[in-house]
Amino acid sequence: MKRIVILISGRGSNMQAMVEAGLPVVAVISNRADAAGLAYAAGRGIATAVVPHRDYTTREAFDAALAQAVDGYRPDLVVLAGFMRILTDSFVRRYQGHLLNIHPSLLPAFPGLETHARALAAGVKLHGCSVHFVTAELDHGPIVIQAAVPVLPHDDEAKLAARVLAQEHRIYPQAARWFLDGKLVIEGGVVRVEGDHPQQLYAP
Ligand code: GAR
């Protein structure tokens, strides 16, 4: 049986989508004790742990403690699901090729925070979300799958965020499933899925 460890910082709706998709989530770890998603995971009988970033004076020390917690669950795949800490190069290297992130934009557009507000301000007509392998560069790395949604004339940040989030909940479990099934191949920084599986989705 394959094993997924999910790192969260808050609500955990993407983590919940993975659990509800029947993926083998063995542990949920947060850098914040008050992350709402921890209660959901515990309620589903999934192991939870908190590694509070405030207990560590350097990013290196925090990431070392985090890695120790993650490794204790012997994961095949580590999933960042709204984990709002910048990871050190050494953490990223340790899990390279086994570490996925979801970002609420069509990367490489809008890395970083407040992606929906920035998409509205830029007047883009399509927005969306991306699942990618994590590299040392923030919100960057080989893209596994993307979902696009329209940006509508009367959208505000909340409406657009909700439309994107619904697609996050579709593409992230799909990407994790492909990974566990050994279907993802990275060639020259580009991800291919073995078999006839579309790596893009448009949800009008
Ligand atoms: C999601 O929208 C995710 O894409 C975003 O945080 C939210 C977490 O929600 N992640 C990032 O912005 C990472 N750069 P969730 O806790 O309900 O899954």
Image (cartoon, rainbow, N blue to C red):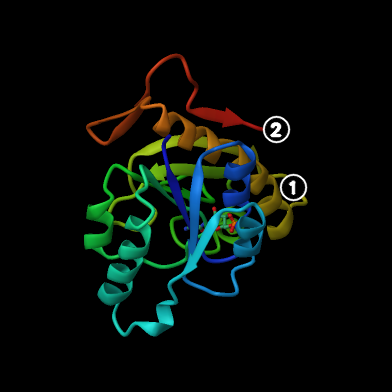
Would residue 23 appear left or right of 162 to someone viewing this image?
left
Give the Cα separation between the discs numbered 2 and 1.
Answer: 14 Å
The quarter of the image that holds ligand 1 is bottom right
Query: Camera-side residue: 38 or 204?
Result: 38
Which residue is disc 2 drawn over?
204
* Earlier sequence position, callout 2 versus callout 1: 1
- In the image, 116 versus 73, the foreground residue is 73
Q: Position of residue 175 (x, y in %)?
A: 47, 35
Quarter of the image with the N terminus in it: top left
Quarter of the image that includes the C terminus: top right
Provide the residue designation for mark 1: 153
Task: Please determine whether, in this image, residue 119 is positioned above or below residue 144.
Answer: below
Circle number at residue 10: none
Query: Residue 156, can we see it?
Result: no
Residue shown at 51%/46% (left/top)?
25
Quadrant position of residue 139:
bottom left
- For numbered disc 2, what is the local secondary structure? loop
